[in-house]
Image: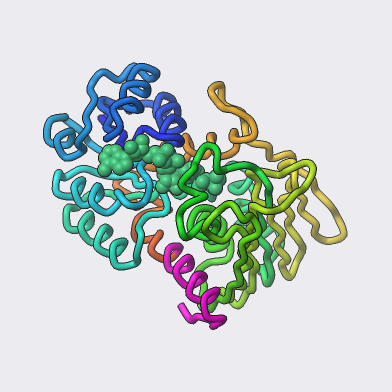
Amino acid sequence: MLNGAVIGCGFFARNQLHGWQAVPGVRILALCDRDPVRLAETAARFGVTRTYADAEAMMAAEDLDFVDIATTVAAHRPLVLAAARAGLHAICQKPFAATMQDAREMVASMERAGKVLMVHENFRWQSPVRALLDALRDGAVGRPFFARFSFRSGHDVFSGQPYLATDPRFIIQDLGIHILDIARAALGDVTRLSASTTRINPAIRGEDVATILLDHASGATSVVDCSYATRRVPDTFPETLIEIDGDQGTLRLEAGYRLVIQRDGGTEIRNVSPPALPWAERPWHNIQESVQVIQSHFIDCLRNGSEPETSGRDNLRTLALVEAAYASARDGSRIAL
Ligand code: NAD
Ligand code: 89V
């Protein structure tokens, strides 16, 4: 049995707590939040009796194997460093760190401690995205030379996550980070990038539209386009729509979780809808299922000693794309990675 604790009992943590209940051989022993009301409510809802306001006190007092950090980004660095000092494995929510320097320090501290660090970068673990990646890796379209990774919605994300309306950075840091990570998972690392951003919603502080052009080391080009200002019916939140052109055919992940593979004059259409887990709420069920999938991956890695696909070290490259996109949008430059 592996013992874990969840730090941060806010909007998203309930998905992580539901997820843990379904991962065999794991038990969440303790919860931590600085907010006593959220802590008590979450403890009661998930039947966790051991609760703490202070994460380091919890790490010292409990017999833990890992911590699951579900706070917003400002607390990620101190909590990962504390986990390293306590000799615990850690999962940390995205965005992994506020700066590249912090991120490198977090990765180095866990490597020195000899502990596993995974970033909760769950979009590439969504089962529809996974179906597309599997088809691509199986050679369904040959060598990919172009792709578009698109997330456009008018869904009200601010009511559940009010900080998204007030943070100076919005869509690239919160959502684009996931889509850039999917682009990396599909086409590999990026050598050059340029980006344009704008803000359509006058009631928020950061950018809510971003268009990013990527050159991949493989020679492929891709576009990552994100918007929370798009009025469309039906709204596709929270689907990432993907098109990939290869030298042998095309792959499309279309609205409604339809995977379309065209090759040699033929068309194959697969329904790759994610299962709606018993605790899930539509339309979030796609994201919610991926939480359970990424948690299972983390536990598999702890058991077999392998590095998670979305490890802290891997995530440095996704985070670098976020930083480069903001830099490019600021001054119009094309950035070499
Ligand atoms: P939230 O503000 O609702 O919850 C964060 C909680 O952490 C709060 O209750 C706060 O009191 C607590 N906290 C902060 N610092 C702490 C500390 N040092 N010690 C103990 N408790 C502390 O935030 P949220 O919307 O749940 O988002 C949390 C993270 O999850 C963010 O980084 C967000 O980007 C990410 N997120 C990820 C996904 C995904 O699909 N991967 C979806 C939504 C949110
Ligand atoms: O996944 C996320 O990080 C969320 C949302 C899908 C709303 O952008 O914040």
Q: Position of residue 132 (x, y in %)?
A: 65, 51
* Residue 321 lies in the magenta-colored region: yes
The one nearer the camera, 249 or 214, is: 214
| Range of magenta residues | 318-337
Give above or below for 202 relative to 188. above
Residue 21 appears anywhere in the view: yes
- In the rendered image, residue 48, in percent from the top left (x then y), is placed at 30, 20
**Residue 290 x/y as whole percent:** 52, 39
Q: Residue at x 65, y 62 (%)?
A: 225
| 331 lies above or below 64 | below
Q: Is residue 8 above or below residue 29?
A: below
Question: Residue farthest to the front?
Answer: 203
Q: Nearer the viewer, residue 78 or 205?
A: 205
Give the x, y percent position of residue 211.
63, 67
Relative placement, left or right, of 266 versus 130 is right
Name the side, left or right, on which 112 lies relative to 182: left
Task: Tell me, yes or no, if residue 67 can be seen here.
Answer: no
Q: Quadrant of the N terminus?
A: top left
Q: Residue at x 19, y 36 (%)?
A: 54
Left or right: 178, with 254 as reference point: left
Residue at 46% x, 59% y is: 168
